[in-house]
Image (cartoon, rainbow, N blue to C red):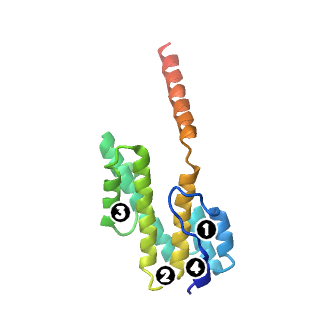
Amino acid sequence: MAYYSLVASLPSLQIGDEPPFSTEEYIDNCAQWVNEREVSILKTVLQNEPIASPCSLCAAWNNIETQFRNAIAKHRGQKLGIDFKEYLQTHDGFSGTIEALVIDAFTRNDPVELEEELDRGRWKLAEELVDQSQDPFEFERVLAYGIQLKIVERWNRMDVSLGKEKIEAVITANTEKEESIEA
């Protein structure tokens, strides 16, 4: 089913912008337009809630996200010289695009740029869910927008000064542990 009015009413999103609404508000708004099954799919993918029966879109996004996380674990494990295999999760299919996106992201020296590139990869993969559909106003667009909204929300919650405080707290806690062990 096509959701012309819903999709046409969605404001544009961009990483770094203020989200127009929360993911929860988005799901609540979509509930007025989409059927119960599709609301369940939105909750499954966007809020990690379990779904009663299997859903091809949920499985597709889960496979994408799992391969993405596996590629990140593999790359970080190789870089650190640790065995990453125990952290890998099973998924169906394989995408060379995902592997290429992760490899490209890890060419960044700045951790913020690396994370941003990873999220740009997720953004692109969400768009590809829509590309598989014949009509850009189908439910796949509604779901992809929700995934992209989650990414925008994540970046909006990031705070450099708060991040520095957290890092300082971790360093202080580790330093105190080392000092108590040495004493």
Q: Earlier in the sequence, mark 2 or mark 1?
A: 1
Q: Nearer the viewer, mark 2 or mark 1?
A: 2
* Residue name at image x 45 percent, y 74 percent: 129
Indicate which disc residue 22 carries.
none
Residue 45 lies, in percent from the top left, at 55, 66
The quadrant of the image that shows the N terminus is bottom right
Q: Which residue is mark 3?
A: 98
Q: Nearer the viewer, mark 4 or mark 3?
A: 4
Q: Amino acid at mark 2?
A: Pro
Q: Earlier in the sequence, mark 4 or mark 1?
A: 4
Q: Amino acid at mark 3?
A: Ile
Q: Which residue is mark 2?
A: 136
* Residue name at image x 67 percent, y 76 percent: 31
Residue 100 lies, in percent from the top left, at 30, 60
Q: Amino acid at mark 4?
A: Ala
Element on which disc 3 rests = helix
Q: Earlier in the sequence, mark 4 or mark 3?
A: 4
Foreground: 110 or 75? 110
Element on which disc 1 rests = helix
